[in-house]
Image (cartoon, grey):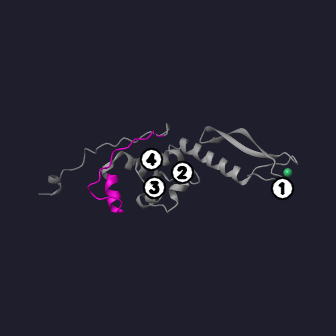
Amino acid sequence: MNTCKKCQSKDVKTLTTNEMVKYKGHDIPFLIEYSICNNCQREFVSKQQIQRGDCHLRDAKKVIDGLLTSEQIKQARKLLGLTQEQAALVFGGGKRAFSKYERAEVSQSVAMDTLIRVYLDNPKIFKRRLAEVGLINSFTQVAKQKIAYPKQHKPVKLRLIKSLPSMQELKYG
Ligand SMILES: [Zn+2]
């Protein structure tokens, strides 16, 4: 509940305005929430409104950076069949890491983002990790999972390096 700090009235109305924020040459539409007290006409932005705005902006920047959004991280974690606590065991980053990512309170690192995608695409690697942290035994099946990645993300194509010397050549006679 929003209360006016000047007159203590709870008769506060919420308004929004659209702004544009520049980020890496892109225009991000940015919805700003603010309040007006109907009693004393004071205009203010509450702490929660600032936090919501920050989270919204953080997510919009992640799309431009090609990172999974907060919603996609949540989707990915569920596809992997993990609770937030289990995700902390599998991925590291602290107990509350996924709760922070999923509320867009913190942006995940590029390394964390990559690891999430690697596990989604490679059930075998994911299964090995689950076994390492004691979440499954070696007989459990893990299915390959797909999620819709951000449009800006261009997957890096891995190519086999053909010029590697063969084992024979390494023996030097
Ligand atoms: Zn007021």
**Is residue 69 visible to us here?**
no
Task: Tell me whether the residue at label 1 lies in contact with that at label 3, contact meaning CB atoms closer than 8 angstroms.
Answer: no
Chain-order first, disc 1 or disc 2: 1
Local packing at callout 2 (Cα closer than 10 Å; few below 14, some 14-19, many 20+) is many
Q: Is residue 131 left or right of residue 90?
A: left
Residue at horizontal 86%, vertical 54%?
A: 7
The CA distance from mark 3 to mark 2 is 12 Å
The residue carrying mark 4 is 76
* Relative image position of residue 124 (x, y in whole percent): 30, 51
Determine if the C-beta at disc 1 is less than 8 A from ligand 1: yes
Extreme residue toward the right, this view? 40
User: Mark 4 is on which residue type?
Assistant: Ala
Residue at horizontal 85%, vertical 48%?
A: 42
Local packing at callout 4 (Cα closer than 10 Å; few below 14, some 14-19, many 20+) is many
Q: Is residue 102 left or right of residue 119?
A: right
Question: What segment is highlighted magenta in the picture?
Answer: 125-149
Q: Is residue 121 magenta?
A: no
For the image shown, how many numbered marks are present on the structure? 4
Q: Is residue 145 above or below residue 9?
A: above
Q: Which mark is residue 83?
A: 3
